[in-house]
């Protein structure tokens, strides 16, 4: 099959390039039309209470989100006029302020004291804005943008929707820079490691096409998260660059014995196809393991990146060979000596000190595990955004002037007695950190008849089946205090209505914490299990997959443990997806070195000479592979102002170098220690093969990782 693919590609190379160029058109259109989600809470499971309550809020009240507008130093008549204008904005269900209840001629003191304190502080007042759509719908986002145009410099819009608008603007502005930095650093690495000044550009063009195909085909998924969109291009570039290097090295090698470049390319494609299939399987498996997450962001990233790796493989064996043949003259004219050293002596050094490296790793295992298990995480997704964003400034003012950080929504039975609702609200106000509880009954109080309220504001707070109350909290989202508070408030509410539901950002984030802790264990188990099985099948061994996975897992623990000792907080998603990506993307380094060691031992070399020679021949390939991954992600990590993206890219860049170090210095010592067991397995497989009439013990490996 591989031979036929090579012949087909060489024969139809011009047609392949034409088709590849044409396919860019629908890809660009699909990329432009793919919806991007900036609200990560929408990836929570649909069946949890907070999500069910969100659906009820949308269906029953015609409102799925709200924001608070702080009006600072404005006349009452101006605030009233602004409220009326905001109420008419498309996507806004209602804007609630003092004049929604009473005429401006009636003094505010008529309202209950708790209500006055909740909506007024000094010369500032609060306006509650209810949106028709949920937090991240296009209508809500458009409404937020329109509201900002109506407001002056004395108005500050808070809430998740406002944060999402700022996150979207920031992400869209940074995205082109991400790609530019990844491309620039990759070119530098390739210029140093390749022997042609032109070949890096062909690599990047073919990979760039595969990236566009991947991003364009996301249209069929309906939408992707902004995290996936931001990382997809640089991550695909980093993990698929090796495939291009495989092909180029194989083609150069074939040219030495095959003067006809077309025949050389046919054989190179055939050889590379086997190599990159073996290499890509573990990478795809690592990304696929993310689909085991209950938090569906993992599935989002897993599907997009698995698809990206597969498209990268296809591009490497079709588009890149066609381009190399078309631009062969340019490639030959731009030949130069590779600037990267051959790492002579590294094999002898690593082999000589193998047991010293193992001892050092053993001594570090306790602090490494301690740091890995106690890495500080944050769940408040807006807590690390730049402080100059309008939404961040608004939230800070809400905290400073009104002592508020979070707002919960309580949905309960509309038939609950008024006196019970007031009693419940009074009990909730006594809970630590609760600033106020506002609902139809708490706003009115005994001195204001219900007839004072308009039908519109009444329908915003109560329907035939449900009523809604807003609860202000001084505790920050994702803090231990607010998590305990939401549990207590929910318990109180269920005493009056056992079907009541507490929803909002803080309760959703509390669920996110619980779910992500479960996901960490399930995803780690799945990724390790899948990759262990793949390696076991490739090597027909049980001890080798255990050794290889252990080495990369040690590197992952080192990588994740560093933030504990530097006092760096990581986004909650980091400890879930980083391990699977680093394992799937860098275990190839370990497979390459192990394949070479086995080959040398089967050839009759003693174990010290075998490990020395293997390191000498494999170290350059491993170094280039790790450096390419590092180059694609490091610049983004340093540049991005969105910490979710920055932290993940820094971890992946650092993880590539750590895995490389572990493979070159820790893995050799383990191979030497377990050499008797490795050779016993090889002998066992040989006996089984001879019994079946198969004289080659190494056929199953197919030299899959020999051409990195």
Image: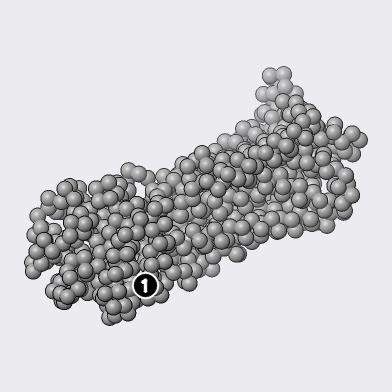
Q: Position of residue 665 (x, y in %)?
A: 69, 54
* Colouring used for the render: one colour
Which corner quadrant holds the N terminus?
Answer: top right
Q: Residue at x 38, y 70 (%)?
A: 151
Count of numbered tags? 1
Examine the image and state in which quarter residue 7 appears. Answer: top right
The image shows residue 2, relative to residue 453, as above or below, that is above
Q: Which residue is mark 1?
A: 155
Examine the image and state in which quarter residue 632 appears. Answer: bottom right
Q: In the rendered image, is residue 377 in sight?
A: no
**The residue tagged with tag 1: helix, strand or loop?**
strand
Q: Residue at x 76, y 28 (%)?
A: 8
Closest to the observer, 55 or 185: 55
Q: Position of residue 684 (x, y in %)?
A: 66, 29
Q: Is residue 521 left or right of residue 195?
A: left
The image shows residue 286, relative to residue 187, as above or below, that is above
Q: Is residue 402 left or right of residue 163?
A: left
Q: Is residue 391 left or right of residue 287?
A: left
Closest to the observer, 631 or 577: 631
Q: Residue at x 8, y 69 (%)?
A: 447
Closest to the observer, 597 or 120: 120
């Amino acid at each position: 099959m591989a031979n036929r693919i090579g012949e087909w590609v060489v024969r139809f190379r011009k047609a392949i390039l034409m088709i590849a160029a044409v396919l860019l058109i629908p890809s660009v259109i699909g990329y432009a039309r793919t919806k991007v989600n900036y609200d990560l809470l929408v990836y929570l499971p649909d069946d949890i209470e907070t999500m069910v309550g969100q659906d009820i809020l949308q269906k029953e009240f015609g409102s799925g989100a709200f924001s608070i507008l702080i009006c600072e130093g404005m006349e009452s008549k101006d605030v009233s006029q602004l409220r009326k204008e905001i109420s008419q904005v498309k996507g806004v269900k209602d804007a609630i302020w003092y004049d929604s209840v009473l005429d401006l001629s009636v003094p505010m003191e008529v309202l209950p004291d708790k209500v006055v304190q909740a909506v007024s502080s000094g010369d500032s007042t609060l306006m509650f804005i209810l949106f028709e759509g949920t937090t991240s719908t296009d209508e809500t986002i458009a409404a937020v943008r329109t509201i900002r145009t109506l407001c002056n410099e004395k108005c500050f819009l808070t809430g998740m929707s406002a944060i999402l608008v700022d996150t979207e603007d920031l992400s869209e502005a940074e995205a082109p820079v991400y790609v530019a930095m990844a491309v620039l650093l990759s070119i530098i690495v390739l210029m140093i490691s390749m022997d042609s000044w032109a070949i890096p550009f062909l690599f990047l063009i073919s990979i760039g096409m595969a990236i566009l195909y991947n991003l364009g085909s996301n249209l069929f998924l309906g939408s992707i998260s902004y995290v996936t969109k931001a990382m997809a291009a640089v991550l695909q570039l980093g993990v698929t660059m090796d495939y291009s290097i495989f092909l180029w090295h194989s083609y150069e090698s074939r040219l030495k014995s095959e003067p006809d470049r077309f025949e050389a390319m046919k054989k190179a494609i055939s050889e590379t196809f086997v190599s990159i299939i073996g290499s890509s399987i573990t990478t795809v498996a690592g990304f696929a393991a993310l689909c085991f997450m209950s938090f569906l962001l993992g599935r989002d990233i897993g599907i997009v990146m698995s698809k990206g790796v597969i498209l990268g493989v296809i591009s490497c064996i079709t588009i890149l060979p066609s381009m190399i043949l078309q631009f062969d003259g340019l490639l030959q004219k731009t030949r130069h000596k590779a600037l990267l050293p051959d790492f002579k002596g590294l094999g002898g050094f690593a082999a000589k000190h193998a047991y010293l490296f193992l001892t050092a790793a053993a001594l570090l295992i306790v602090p490494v595990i301690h740091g890995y298990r106690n890495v500080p995480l944050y769940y408040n997704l807006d807590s690390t955004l730049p402080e100059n964003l309008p939404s961040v400034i608004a939230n800070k003012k809400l905290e400073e002037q009104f002592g508020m950080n979070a707002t919960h929504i309580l949905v309960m039975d509309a038939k609950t007695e008024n006196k019970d609702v007031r009693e419940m609200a009074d009990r909730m106000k006594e809970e630590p950190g609760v600033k106020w509880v506002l609902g139809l009954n708490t706003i009115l109080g005994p001195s204001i008849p219900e007839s004072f309220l308009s039908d519109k504001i009444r329908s915003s707070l109560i329907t035939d089946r449900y009523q809604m109350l807003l609860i202000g909290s001084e505790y920050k989202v994702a803090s231990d205090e607010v998590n305990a508070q939401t549990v207590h408030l929910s318990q109180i509410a269920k005493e009056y209505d056992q079907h009541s539901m507490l929803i909002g950002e803080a309760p959703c984030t509390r669920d996110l914490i619980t779910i992500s802790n479960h996901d960490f264990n399930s995803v780690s188990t799945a990724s390790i299990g899948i990759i262990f099985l793949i390696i076991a099948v490739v090597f027909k061994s049980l001890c080798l997959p255990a050794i290889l996975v252990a080495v990369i897992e040690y590197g992952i623990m080192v990588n994740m443990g560093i933030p504990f000792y530097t006092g760096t907080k990581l986004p909650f998603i980091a400890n879930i997806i980083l391990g699977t990506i680093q394992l799937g993307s860098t275990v190839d380094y370990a497979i390459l070195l192990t394949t070479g060691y086995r080959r040398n031992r089967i050839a009759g070399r003693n174990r010290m000479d075998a490990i020395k020679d293997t390191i000498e021949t494999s170290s350059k390939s491993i170094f280039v592979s790790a450096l390419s991954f590092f180059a694609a992600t490091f610049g983004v990590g340093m540049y991005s102002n969105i910490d979710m993206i920055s932290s993940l890219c820094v971890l992946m860049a650092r993880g590539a170098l750590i895995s490389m170090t572990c493979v070159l210095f820790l893995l050799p010592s383990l191979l030497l220690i377990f050499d008797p067991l490795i050779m016993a397995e090889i002998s066992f497989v040989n006996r089984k093969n001879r019994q079946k009439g198969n004289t080659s013990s190494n056929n199953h490996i197919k030299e899959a990782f020999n051409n990195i």
